[in-house]
Amino acid sequence: MAMVLGLTFSLGAHWAVLQSVAWVSMFVTYSRTAPVCEALIKTFDGRHPCGLCVFVAGGKKADDQKPQQVVNTPQLDLFLDTPAPIVLLETDAPPASSFQECWEPRAERPPSPPPRIG
């Protein structure tokens, strides 16, 4: 929960949440004395801001004027920058063309009966 709150504040989303709360409270207040259509117009026209709207506008303006702090953190390189070279050696043996040529079959037969563990 603390991580979500920290991320919310670091991205500036708290101003959007506060502005939404202000709009809802303004709409509820205006709809008590006027029709719904007029309450919506008064809420979003910008000529009738509430105290919370003024606070949010001032907070956004202050955030925009603040210089951003740059934190220099050491970076970890978890991977090598350059790959290891591939070394090919020349041999006298011709290359094997199939699995059968590469591996010789076993000449002796397995013991009968199979050996037992002591």
Image (tube, rainbow, N blue to C red):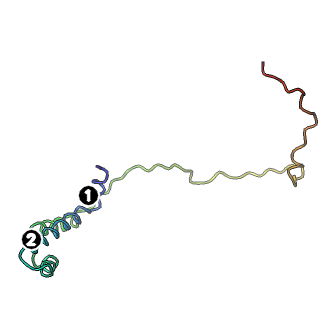
Q: Secondary structure at mark 1?
A: helix
What percent of the width, then of the height, locates residue 98? 87, 53
Q: Nearer the viewer, mark 1 or mark 2?
A: 2
Residue lying furthest left: 33
Q: Quadrant of the C terminus?
A: top right
What percent of the width, then of the height, locates residue 36? 14, 78
Above or below: residue 112 compared with residue 19:
above
What percent of the width, then of the height, locates residue 21? 18, 65
Q: Is residue 43 left or right of residue 72?
A: left
Residue 110: which quarter of the image?
top right
Q: Nearer the viewer, residue 5 or 73?
A: 5
Q: Which residue is identified by label 2?
A: 29
The type of residue carrying mark 1 is: Phe
Above or below: residue 117 compared with residue 100:
above
| Distance CA(mark 1)–CA(mark 2) | 28 Å
Q: Secondary structure at mark 2?
A: helix
Q: Is residue 116 left or right of residue 76?
A: right
Q: Which mark is residue 59?
A: none
Q: Is residue 76 visible?
A: yes
Q: Which residue is identified by label 1?
A: 9
The type of residue carrying mark 2 is: Thr
Q: Residues within 10 Å of mark 1 (few under 14, many from 20)?
A: few
Residue depicted at 60% across the width and 54% down the height: 82
Q: Nearer the viewer, residue 82 or 100?
A: 100
Q: Is residue 92 visible?
A: no
Quick one: label 1 or label 2, which is nearer the N terminus? 1
Residue 13: which quarter of the image?
bottom left
Residue 31: which quarter of the image?
bottom left
